[in-house]
Image: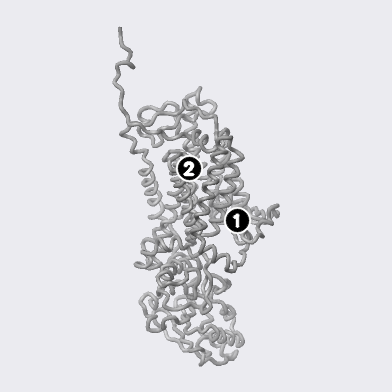
Amino acid sequence: MRVPEAEWQVPTIVPAEKPEASIEEHAQLALGDTDYDESQQTHAPRWRWRWLTSAPLQGLLALAVYAAVSLPTVARPLLSHPSWAQLLHRNDPNTFIWSLRWWPYAIGHGLDPLYTTMVIAPIGHSLAWVTTVPTLALLAAPLTLTAGPVVAFNLLVALAMPLSAWAAFLACRRLTGTFLPALVGGAVYGFSAYEFGHVAAGQLDLCFILLPPLLTYLVLAWRDGAIRSFVLVILAGLVLAAQFYLYLETFAFLTVILVLSLLLGLAIANGTGRRKVLRLSGLLGLAYLMAMALASPYLAAALTAASPTPPPVHSMDLTSLWLPTLGRPLGLAWLAGAQTGPHAASPGCSVGIQLLAVVVVLAATRWRSRLVWFLISLLVVVIVGALGPVLYIAGRPEAVLPWHGLFSLPFVRNAYPNRLMLFAFLILAMATTLLLAGAMQQRQPGRWRARWSLAGRWPLAGRWPLAGRWPLAGRWSLAARWSLGALVVAFGALNVPGSLAVASQTAVPSFISSGYYHRQLPPGEIVMVVSRTGDAGMLWQAESGFRWRLAGGYIGEGWDRRSGMPAGTHDLVSPGPRRIHGFEALIRREDIGAILVDTNRPPRWTRILGIFGLTGHQEGGVIVYPTDGCRTCRDVTWPEIHAAMTAP
């Protein structure tokens, strides 16, 4: 009698390992879905291939991929000449360069880092409502003190995109357990129009967006049992405190999104899921208490300082949802008009039809999943909030929205609604990952695919109607979804040009870089810097190590936004005897000891400095005008002004 094969075959001993959950199992864990069939779960790949599914290895590989895409292309000009202040934005880069140097200087000299007299001298200005990015300034302090603030700034800008994409990858991989879908999802977030727009502007507070997905990763890890509750509270509290110090507006938006997410979770989940959401709410509440304790010095300074002037409302244009990419109308006249109209289609909000298609297909194929409906509902809420108080379509205001009164509240009125799209791109990244992970499912994977697939554990997308009866249906499902994924990657690549727009030469003259100012300016001298380079004074001051104080500064009312010059000098664009007399009074009142004029980009009005009593000399790319309290200043006449302004 023949012995059955199952009885004589020697069993293979494989180390026990808990298989990662499938998409449906994740949805069940998160919101209490009950339609998950455990019979669809496949076995883990053999032990000798398990290193391919190692989370740390895949995380390092994803970071390497994102860095290989962005550093040699987008960030190449910054890394090839890291000591240059290169980005062509008007003011923001120099402000952040100043901030990176200010925090180590203030702490090292025992000064209050939330109030400074180094700018808007001699009065000074509170920094509580100024985005001085202390989180990044302290992390980059060793590099700033050794190589200079410009090098630190350029390196941080270069790393912003790959790090943000990597953080989103971690959250997406934790959500599905797959590598390639999470890799695409991370790119959707880290290389979005939102991210590149702020990277190109050099806005460190807005382009470092890795903290929201890191918080998402911690919540998912707690849900899966990978971390305990007290670990979630501690790590989430640290992440929230870091975000508070990095940028207060993003922290406020994150808080609103978390509250809405918990409410939606309670509404969508079943009984088991609701209990988990309630427990998560309590843990996040404890994390917020910890974050507020860590941020209490900053919070106290913000509550006691005058809030900034509310900005003009920055609403998202509705056409941004289907624009292919920022600033590229692709030959369509109506699209070009929308991007150049009276309210240009909001920068950084370009989503594209391909990502909208991802949402539609995911809803159609996973319509029973509570997790999918949670993501879609939250996405709708975020987009509605980003529209702001007035609905704009193709550059024209069409209607006042019913919730417009919310944007006049004390804290909300200082916010930019279109920046809520940061969270929309995170939701879209997770939706893309879910869709592509479903395409990698297989009902009965063969040996080769079980070994080599970086997912390796996903059953076939059995919820497609014909998948169980017609074998080709599953293949069409995979091909269709990955074709859509390829479109997402292709259109996303349009957001990334060859490289960032940079200056052809450094904005720091040799008068500063070579230390000539040591001979010309005594320590603590109040100096006015005049240049057509946006906020050059703060850049020069940071490079000099705060040897002198600055009259004006782009952190508040000390800078004239109309001309980009220190407050009180705009009227000199059209000089007259009375206006020149007012400028002389400004020099005496503010105790300005010297005026530095950038010879590379001097405003035309600086020609009048030599006709009312100041004598300047040129050194290291700068004309230095010692004022001596304006003792030699005199009245001027119209003919003298006309001769000075019309001279070749």
- Badge 1 element: helix
In this view, 589 is above or below 251: below
Quadrant for residue 589, please give it: bottom right
For the point 60% across and 88% down, which residue is it?
Answer: 577
Its colouring scheme is one colour
Tell me if mark 1 has few (under 14), some (14-19) or many (20+) residues whose alpha carbon lies within 10 angstroms of its own. Answer: many
Q: Position of residue 230 (x, y in %)?
A: 46, 47
Left or right: 227, with 568 as reference point: left
Q: Position of residue 218 (x, y in %)?
A: 46, 46
Checking the image for residue 469, the label placed there is none
User: Please, what is the three-letter code of the amino acid marked with disc 2?
Assistant: Leu
User: Please, what is the three-letter code of the amino acid marked with disc 1?
Assistant: Pro
Q: What residue would you read off at disc 2?
A: 220
Quadrant for residue 452, please give it: top left
Proximity of marks 1 and 2: CB atoms separated by less than 8 Å: no
Quadrant for residue 567, please give it: bottom right
Nearest to viewer (mark 1 / mark 2): 2
Residue 258 seen in render = yes
For the point 52% across and 75% down, which residue is it?
Answer: 124
Left or right: 62, with 415 as reference point: left
Q: What residue would you read off at disc 1?
A: 417
Q: Position of residue 92 (x, y in %)?
A: 50, 66
